Image: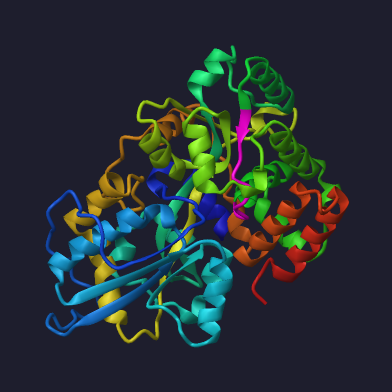
Amino acid sequence: MIKKVISTAVTSVFIVGLLAACGSNTDKTSEGTTAPASPASSTAAGASAAPADSAKPVTIKMFTASPEYTDAFNAYIKEYKKVKPNVTIELEIIQADYPTILKSKIASANIPDVFQSTAGGEIKQYEEYSADLTNEPLAAAMTDAVKGNMSADGKVLGLPVKGNLFALIYNKKLFADAGITEVPKTTAQLDAAIAKLNAKGIKPFANGYKEWWVQKHIFQSFLDAASDDAGKLVNDFIAGKTTFKDHPVLMNYFDFVDKTVANGLPKQLERDFAAETSDFATGKAAIMTGQGAWAEDGILKITPDFQIGIMGYPVNDDASKALIITGADQALRINKDSKVVKETTEFFNWLYTSDYGKQWFSDVAKVIPPIKAGKMPALQIPTAMGEILKTEKSADLSIIYSLDSFHQKFGEIMQAYIGKAKTRDQAVDEIQKAWIQLGAAK
């Protein structure tokens, strides 16, 4: 059961692995930057994927939704070319409307050799298109918690693109300049911190509300606070058995969004992930919303000595509910009907088991590996989370209980709300209807 898997995963987030959420630009490329390490011999592809002909030219088409990892993906593509010179990997990355475009490709029988989906509900949704990886070396290399997030009906159907850490990210220096000595954990404490920042002429919030997906990252903290079993609560919404008004903390989500808009930089709906990262990294605002561990690399590229802090979302007057969320929410799927399924499986077996692959996660992608043999990256956010987990638990990755088709509609509704094209009541009504219509595979 997904809930049990996540419960295990959140007690050991750094075994789960951290990759990113999503950017908004589009990039198409086949080869890129050089990896920093020498290649290792490829591990055998496994029982169901016999070694491919080493001379026959092979092209593998990958379609993903993580543009912030373009350089890292290109690094392992170039490195694998040294191992398998006959294999060319064509990488297409698009975020803006990825779920819709993926469905269009599937409907037109133009399914890529590799495609991306979320974990949880979408593992099952795309089961009929996904190769069974249960007996592959890559599956054996995964941590147990990650493997659970990638599985349905007892089969491993995906490999983790990323585990995630979702939090409010804050500028330690600006907090200190404003006299904020304790991280706010309640709404009253957050209001007090906002007042102190404003008094010093510091904008409290950097937002990227041009992106639909930032809203699901924010909302899940309020969803977790509304129930001890977020999975059951989501299923009740999908079944039409409950409403927002049955759970007052969910209405606090709108208060939080309003607060970030009122105390944020201008033109909220024109600022995408890149703009939000730049705003935060250059000190234009003290708190970054809707993001997580994936943002660190971009922040430090702009300001290398930036001092990053993380905190849970204050959702009400209960400090114990302000928890950081962890878990593996994204998966790559190998098209089971691909003409190069063996070669594609062999490629990912290499990434998950070779010496190069073991260091790629931490040294190139700069994320915590989802594999047992990986090493930890030297990053501020994972280090901070490790300290937090010594005294606090982390919360459920509740976004995986709904499909991304719902989340995209949810984000669009909230963009209309932020732009004052919808009232709060209208937004709530439309979100509840969208949950019923789009929340789960039909």
- Is residue 210 a member of the stretch shown in magenta? yes
- Does residue 249 sit above or below 181 in this rendering? below
- Does residue 362 sit above or below 178 in this rendering? below
Q: How is the image coloured?
A: rainbow
Which percent across, then down, holds residue 304? 35, 30
Query: At 17% across and 67% down in the image, what residue appears?
Result: 81
Which percent across, then down, holds residue 324? 56, 37
- Screen quadrant of the C terminus: bottom right
- Does residue 271 sit above or below 136 in this rendering? above
252 horizontally vs 272: left or right: right
439 horizontally vs 365: left or right: right
- What span is colored magenta in the figure? 204-213
Which percent across, then down, holds residue 109? 49, 87
Total numbered circles: 0
- In-front residue for pair 255/228: 255
Which percent across, then down, holds residue 336? 40, 82
- Screen quadrant of the N terminus: bottom right
Query: At 55% across and 53% down in the image, what residue appears?
Result: 4
Magenta highlight: main SS:
loop
- Is residue 196 a member of the stretch shown in magenta? no
Q: Is residue 138 visible?
A: yes
Query: At 15% across and 50% down in the image, what residue appears?
Result: 37
Q: Is residue 12 visible?
A: no
